Image: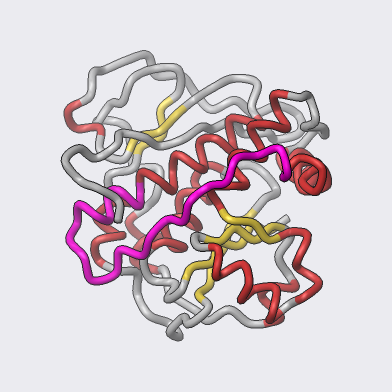
């Protein structure tokens, strides 16, 4: 199963989604990728997105600890290259998560058969939460559970409150990128904790956080990894 993150340029937001989700999904059969509706070919990740991702740590059953290893390797960040969304990329993805509503329209225009599996990232997070609350998440693996939510989404979506876009921070300062990173990871937290039986979380910048118990990621025979989100909200910054 492949989860595709889509933004405009595939430089700032969708690389964060791809690399963070990939860290969360390590040890499962689910992969993460990204593309941009107007993506440049083979461009490096925006430096501010890279700075935000370099701070990410995943912790289990405890507080943030800056001594933990980064959950995204420097090589993965440095090796990222952008690409433009194509029909083949869209058609080959099992779940497509967009950062803006207009990108959903662009995906569906490009690939009409994707209409039942393309969502706004923030709204899909709410769909996952409601499915979990109502006992609608089924399946043994992470991939199966995600598919069960996709299958239930036509019935659940009318019950979910509208969700907002995650704005493009391109050309803005690092604080705006921190906000986008936090928003992206709050959504990922909500998605993955809906699949999990045991909660965990990760943080973007653990430097000032307290030390806590450090457990290990849970894996069972189905190779379920049970992560939850990254999340210290930047202070003094508004997401515009």
Residue at x 76%, y 33% (from the top left corner): 222
Q: Is residue 155 above or below residue 138?
A: below
Pick the front one: 89 or 67? 89
Is residue 171 highlighted in magenta? Answer: yes
Name the residue at the top extreme. 213
Question: Could you tell whether 207 is left or right of 71 in the image?
Answer: left
How far across and how far down the image is residue 65, in percent? Answer: 28, 26
Percent across and percent down for residue 204 are 31, 40
Which image quarter holds the N terminus?
A: bottom right
Quarter of the rendering containing residue 145: top right
**Relative side of 87 to 210, left or right:** right
Q: Position of residue 118 (x, y in %)?
A: 68, 61
Q: Is residue 116 above or below residue 133?
A: below
Give the vertical position of 139 relative to 184 (above or below). Answer: above
Is residue 240 toward the left or the right of residue 36 in the image? left
Q: Residue at x 77, y 32 (%)?
A: 137
**Residue at position x 39%, y 19% in the image:** 214
* Residue for point 55% across, 52% down: 121
Classify the position of the C terminus by image quarter.
bottom left
Q: Name the image quarter holding residue 57.
A: top left
Relative placement, left or right, of 151 versus 233 is right
Residue 194 drawn at (x, y percent): 64, 31
The outermost residue toward the bottom is: 41
Please report the bounds of the magenta region as a residue range. Answer: 157-181
Look at the image and say whether residue 174 sits in the magenta stretch.
yes
Colour style of the rendered protein structure: secondary structure
């Amino acid at each position: 199963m492949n989860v595709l993150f889509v933004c405009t340029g595939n430089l700032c937001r969708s690389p964060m989604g791809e690399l963070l989700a990939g860290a969360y999904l390590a040890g499962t059969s689910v992969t993460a990728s990204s593309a941009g509706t107007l993506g440049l070919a083979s461009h490096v990740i925006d430096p501010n997105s890279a700075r935000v991702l370099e701070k990410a740590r995943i912790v289990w059953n405890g507080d943030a600890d800056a001594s933990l290893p980064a959950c995204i390797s420097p090589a993965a960040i440095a090796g990222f290259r952008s690409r433009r969304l194509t029909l083949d990329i869209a058609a080959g993805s099992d779940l497509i998560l967009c950062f803006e509503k207009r990108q959903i329209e662009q995906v569906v225009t490009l690939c009409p058969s994707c209409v039942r599996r393309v969502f706004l990232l923030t709204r899909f997070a709410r769909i996952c939460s409601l499915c979990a609350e109502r006992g609608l998440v089924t399946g043994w693996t992470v991939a199966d559970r995600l598919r069960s939510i996709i299958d239930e989404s036509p019935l659940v979506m009318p019950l979910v409150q509208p969700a907002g876009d995650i704005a493009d921070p391109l050309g803005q300062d690092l604080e705006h990128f921190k906000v986008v990173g936090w928003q992206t990871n709050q959504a990922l937290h909500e998605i993955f904790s809906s699949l999990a039986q045991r909660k965990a979380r990760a943080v973007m910048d653990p430097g000032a956080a307290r030390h806590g118990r450090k457990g290990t990621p849970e894996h069972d025979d189905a190779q379920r990894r049970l992560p939850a989100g990254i999340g210290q909200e930047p202070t003094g910054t508004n997401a515009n």
